[in-house]
Image (cartoon, grey):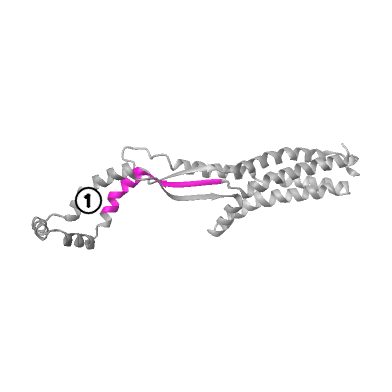
């Protein structure tokens, strides 16, 4: 290949990788959604009813009842709170299990850039900085250096720059980022599984997680970047007498 052809191919690969990277950074990467389950709501409803029946509530309820009935309850020592709970709990539980609708209580959709911003907002600068550095700064720095090297007249400087790009490419940690996303995905999915055991409580909130378009864009960038680095590696390996020196 001539130097102009090599330069054109390298810049074309670089432009294509940037086109894959940009939506990978800004498009939604992961969406997590949490909804109340019927079984969970029905399970906690009796406990909420019991805690909600305060002394003031019972006093108001007695004021609405027939005085003679209230007198009978007081004379027999009947606990009105216990009676209400025992009578209403089966009806409330059955009604909730049958008719309660799915209620969304949590929803998060984040891109890589949005995740970095959110981590800084909640006071987690270390993971935010790592994601920013290895998923944003390093890929963009590689692109700038490769583009700069393609227009260098000095062959040695060009080869040193491309060699430096090869070295920092090993620290891009794209695989670590993908694994982190996978862990988040599996953790969210695991929360939907019921806890084993005969006395296990049903989950109150069921979480689901889905990868967004940004994940696939970023994964495509990672694969394409690795492939295009092979071409860069051949440029680095060429001797100084290569046509690139012109």
Q: Is residue 136 left or right of residue 238?
A: left
Residue at which label 1 appears: 85
Q: Is residue 150 left or right of residue 35?
A: right
Q: Residue at x 74, y 39 (%)?
A: 228
Most common secondary structure along the magenta stretch: helix
Find out whether residue 46 is within the magenta segment. Answer: yes
Instruction: For label 1, count other residues whose C-alpha is less than 10 Å away and answer few (under 14), some (14-19) or many (20+).
Output: some
Q: Nearer the viewer, residue 130 or 66?
A: 66
Q: Residue at x 37, y 38 (%)?
A: 196
* Residue 166 visible from this viewpoint: no
Q: Nearer the viewer, residue 25 or 66?
A: 66
The magenta segment: 30-49
SS label for mark 1:
helix
Task: Answer with the quarter of the image where residue 60 lies.
Answer: bottom left
Residue 213 lies, with reference to residue 62, above or below; the image says above
Give the quarter of the figure containing the C terminus: top right
* Residue 70 visible from this viewpoint: yes
Residue 11 lies, with reference to residue 73, above or below; the image says above
Q: Is residue 120 left or right of residue 79?
A: right
């Amino acid at each position: 290949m001539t130097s102009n052809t090599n330069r054109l191919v390298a810049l074309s690969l670089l432009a294509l990788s940037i086109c894959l990277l940009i939506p990978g950074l800004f498009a939604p990467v992961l969406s997590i959604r949490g909804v109340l389950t019927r079984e969970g709501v029905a399970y906690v409803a009796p406990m909420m009813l019991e805690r909600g029946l305060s002394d003031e509530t019972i006093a108001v309820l007695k004021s609405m009842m027939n005085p003679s009935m209230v007198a009978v309850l007081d004379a027999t020592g009947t606990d009105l709170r216990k009676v209400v709970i025992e009578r209403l709990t089966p009806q409330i539980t059955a009604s909730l299990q049958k008719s309660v609708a799915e209620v969304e209580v949590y929803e998060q959709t984040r891109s890589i850039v949005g995740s970095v911003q959110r981590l800084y907002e909640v006071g987690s600068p270390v993971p935010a900085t790592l994601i920013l550095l290895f998923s944003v700064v390093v890929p963009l720095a590689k692109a700038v250096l490769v583009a700069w090297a393609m227009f260098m007249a000095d062959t040695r400087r060009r080869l040193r720059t491309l060699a430096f790009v090869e070295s920092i490419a090993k620290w891009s940690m794209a695989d670590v980022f993908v694994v982190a996303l996978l862990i988040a995905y599996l953790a969210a999915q695991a929360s939907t599984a019921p806890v084993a055991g005969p006395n296990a409580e049903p989950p109150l909130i069921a979480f689901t997680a889905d990868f967004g378009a940004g994940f696939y864009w970023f994964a495509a960038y990672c694969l394409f970047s690795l492939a295009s680095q092979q071409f860069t590696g051949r440029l680095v390996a060429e001797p100084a007498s290569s046509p690139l020196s012109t």
